Image (cartoon, rainbow, N blue to C red):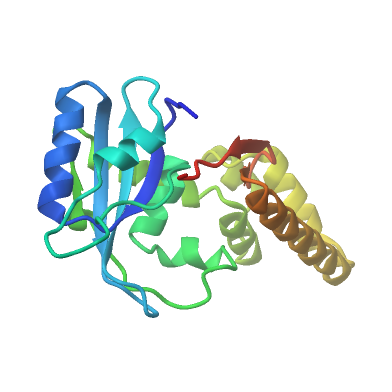
Amino acid sequence: MATQRPISTISYNSESFLVEKLNALVSAHTLQSYVYIKHTGEDGDKDHIHLLVFPNKRIDPMDLSDHLKEFVQGSAKPLGVLNWHTSKESDWFLYAIHNADYLASHSEFEKEKIPYCEDDFVYSEGFLLHESLARALASLKHSTASIVQSLRSGVDPVSLIEVGSNPFLVNNVFRLLSSSDFSDLKHQVDFYRSVVNQMNELFFRLGYEVNIDSITGKVDIFRRYVDE
């Protein structure tokens, strides 16, 4: 399925091959830009590259996968990339650097991971890396987890709204924390979170991805790109 949205994948290509192919795609105006970061393998995984690309036009992710097949002498199977997924830029960057606050707010990341920094990224000419990373880090300040932590530490709700936090989210979290029934409500939240996780697993098996905005609650459903 063709898309013009930012998409990401994990690459096991050699870095020299990957850069050559990506630069060729930028020169051909197929991609507007790209950015990637190398991660050392953890928990039995091999070293790999997290790659985010910004299409310049509608492209078929499977065509990209074919373009990045790297045939290695003596190997029956070429190096390449995993399935592509639509990506929210801020989430991609926060995971890419293994931001501790971001990982802690997502239950699927139970173990500490190797931290990375801005200097570890490689990107196409003209890509505004510093600005993109700054936006990603700024988004943490207005996340639900951050608002809960601030209110618990005594920060005035109005102060959070003045610095850009969603007023409805701040109000709801403040009322929740102020409630004598907070413990019961927390159990309800945990229950609904479990339901959401089960829903995500179901949609994943059916070939779809579900993206729920933690601030607005907006739900987007996308068809996954599956190699045939």
Q: Position of 196 compared to 104: left or right? A: right
Is 12 drawn above or below residue 181 in the view shown?
above
Number of on-image labels:
0
In which quarter of the view is residue 186 placed? bottom right
Q: Which residue is located at x 26 percent, y 71 percent?
A: 40
Q: Quadrant of residue 118?
A: bottom left
Residue 138 appears in the picture as rendered: no
Above or below, comparing residue 120 to residue 134 in the picture: below
Residue 62 against residue 105 in the figure, above or below = above
Measuring from the top left, give residue 207's x and y in whole percent: 62, 45
Side of 62 relative to 203 (left or right): left
Which residue is depicted at the point 70% across and 59% down?
197
Image location (x, y in percent) of residue 172: 76, 48
Residue 164 appears in the rendering = yes
- Given residues 142 and 47, the one toward you in this image is 47
Task: Pinpoint residue 183: horizontal percent, then vertical percent.
Answer: 84, 71
Where in the figure is residue 184, as x and y percent of width and height?
88, 69
Give the residue at x 65% y 37%: 221
Near-viewer residue (107 or 215): 107
Horizontal side, residue 103 vs residue 214: left or right? left
